[in-house]
Amino acid sequence: MGGRITLNRLAIARRGYKLISVLFYISGLVCIIAPDLNPAAAAVAGGIMLILYGMIRITGYLSNDLYCLAFQHDFACGMLLMVLGIIELILHARFRGYLLPAFGILVLFDGLLCVQTAIDARRFGLVSWHIILAGSILLGVLGVVLIIVNTQMVAGCCLLAEGLVHHYLMQCTMSPSMTRQRHGTDGK
């Protein structure tokens, strides 16, 4: 029974990461295409997404994935995202000028954590660790650019990169083929 619950949490976390990646793609495109959005509506949508993303990350952490690559930092990150989401929902008008730089700090931090994940993936023998590393570096650079430039266009690029990196990370660290590779049963 306990194994089944863990498997269900893992499936929920995988689906959640895919969902949040799609939401990041959509939000990123909206920020790029329509940068003059209503700031209050954008803040509310952003707050809800942060809370949802935090819940997904905590679920991932609790899923006990086999190699602890995809979810290794997700409990603390999930809590941070939920707290920031609640703050953004409640106090967005007061902190309007700080929201994009704060998001840049989150993206930079996430990029740095993904660099660590790439290093761990290399140690585990994951062939695509260098792609994770390149995406992580891109995330970090975009985070720094958002802190400095502070525009919706850059925020949109950050959202697209977040979605892409986490979608790829989930696919390559949680795919059945990766599990078969690690156990030496890839059928060849």
Image (cartoon, rainbow, N blue to C red):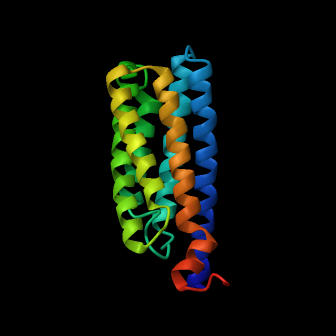
Question: Would you place residue 188 above or below residue 83 in this image?
Answer: below
How far from the left and from the top, in percent, is residue 183?
Answer: 54, 85
Q: Which of 128 and 141 lies nearest the eye of the viewer?
A: 128
What quarter of the picture does the N terminus occupy? Answer: bottom right
Instruction: Name the residue: 47% across, 50% down.
Output: 54
- Residue 120, quarter of the rendered image: bottom left
Instruction: Name the residue: 57% across, 39% down.
Output: 24
Q: Which of 179 and 74 lies nearest the eye of the viewer?
A: 179
View extreme (front): residue: 188
Instruction: Name the residue: 48% across, 73% down.
Output: 64
Q: Which of 154 and 35 lies nearest the eye of the viewer?
A: 154
Question: Would you place residue 71 above or below residue 40 in this image?
Answer: below
- Residue 171, quarter of the rendered image: bottom right
Left or right: residue 166 versus residue 11 is left
How far from the left and from the top, in percent, is residue 17?
Answer: 57, 54
How far from the left and from the top, in percent, is residue 153?
Answer: 50, 22
Q: Which of 84 and 166 lies nearest the eye of the viewer?
A: 166
What quarter of the picture does the C terminus occupy? Answer: bottom right
How far from the left and from the top, in percent, is residue 100?
Answer: 40, 26
View extreme (top): residue: 36
- Residue 99, quarter of the rendered image: top left
